[in-house]
Amino acid sequence: MTLANIMTWATLAGYGLALFGLVRVTTPHKVSASEFFEGSSRQGQLPGLWLLVASAAISWIFAKSIDNAASLANAFGVWGGLGYAIYYLSFVTAAFALYYLRTRGFRSIPEFLVNKYGKLCARLFLLAIIIRLLNEVWSNTKVFSLYFGPEGSLGYWLAAAIVTAFTVYYTLLGGLRSSLLTDGAQMLLAAVLLVTILVTLGPGLAATGLPAVEPETRLAGLTFCGLAFVQIFSYPFHDPVLTDRAFITSPRVMVRGFVLAGLISGGFIFLFSSVGLYARAAGVEGSPALMVPALFGLPMLLVFNAIMLTSAGSTLDSTFSSVAKLTARDWFNRRGIPTETQARFGRWGIVAIAILGNLPLLSIYLGDRVGPAIILATTISGTMVMGLAPIFLLAFIARAGALSFHLAFWPGLIFGVLRVLENALSTQIFPTWLSIGGGKYALDFGINFYGLLLCTAGFLLGAWLSPKPRK
């Protein structure tokens, strides 16, 4: 075993020990339902503004997003990093839409959906959420595990198993409360690591300047920015890691917290995209997040390893706590049963998602076509939930009911599935005239833009066809 391998595993051990100590100090052996599901303190106090900000921000600075930001900046220059940062305007969309729900007395999104659109619509929404949560697990474990060995190697699998098991352990203890407290520490650590990376890469980028991009590449980057902007109107609503946090403080604190978290996490992502700019300027081949630290030796490799562990761990524990709430409260509506029973259902849900969420990693053994197709099938959520935009943003329309939900939800879902089939089967389904802009994301931009218009029109049509509600 080389020195780099030893130090990489030592970094993992240090990360685990630090979090273990934090959890043992802050989390009692038995937690109440409000602690486990709502993140309140032992004394029943709601989370404060800055704990909400730190938790919401780091939960969206997940390992895959960091890797994506660097890769997109490498591909499209500064426009790639900016485009990915645009997704973080989702916090603003969510803040104002969910403020509307909070001020009308709803305690969760499923409760609102059942009241407004009916139980079937709520179940369909939760099924889409489950796909998102499965995607969160494998996509994060895969990214950080690559620092411990090539895909499929012993080190790769050990890292995935150890971090998953450890995160399951402390989330089982304290649920959302453990997630919030560890998120605060992880946000501080991530900020320190980002500063270290910027200080290291900054002089080189300052000397060379921003890498030049061809007009076609610039257009492709701007097209991606357009795609990101269209998706921010639906994207946040299918992420319970974000939306669950909208119901744990007062509505006013939530709005301020979400806006601040969006600015902080979006700024973090944009700054980290400088790794991709550095790779483009230096002509580095391969994944920037893996290859750039190798240029600076072992210390920088360990810094990147630590930031990936931190971001992945924060997203995993938030995912697990969201699954616990979905299992124990949202799907079966078990609020009236004893605390111990609620927590038991939630904990079984955590164990289940930890196992099922990592199964897509096994797709590397299924061949060059089947394996990538399985991975692709778990990442369609951004397009398939485009119909959620009118469902939440136009919720104030009184006549909108189940028909409006279905006429908005199903077109987006069908478009997402067809887009996956198009890529997986290497065949054309959508006509090229739908494309907007240029480059790799032109067709996706067009599908999402016109699809959003179609879903919105369907929602409004459903409201027009529905009978006027009784007063």
Image: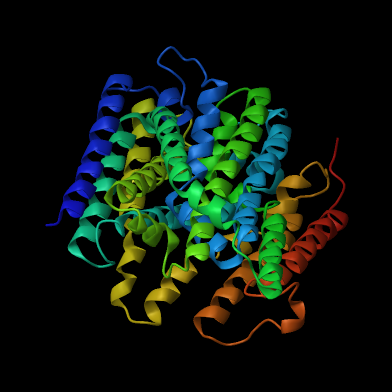
Residue extending furthest toward the bottom: 427
96 horizontally vs 81: left or right = right
Q: Residue at x 34, y 44 (%)?
A: 306
- Percent from the top left, x then y, of residue 394? 79, 47
- Percent from the top left, x then y, of residue 171? 34, 36
Q: Residue at x 33, y 49 (%)?
A: 305
Residue 80 falls in image quadrant: bottom right
Which quarter of the figure is the C terminus placed in? Answer: top right
Between 402 and 185, the one lying in front of the other is 185
Between 334 and 64, the one lying in front of the other is 64
Looking at the image, can residue 17 be seen?
Answer: yes
Between 392 and 208, the one lying in front of the other is 208
Q: Is residue 419 above or below residue 462?
A: below
- Percent from the top left, x then y, of residue 197? 44, 45
122 horizontally vs 411: left or right = left
Q: Residue at x 31, y 41 (%)?
A: 167
Q: Is residue 352 above or below residue 417?
A: above
Residue extending furthest toward the front: 207
Which quarter of the figure is the N terminus placed in? Answer: bottom left
Between 471 and 403, the one lying in front of the other is 403
The structure's colour scheme is rainbow
- Percent from the top left, x then y, of residue 456? 79, 59
Looking at the image, can residue 126 be seen?
Answer: no
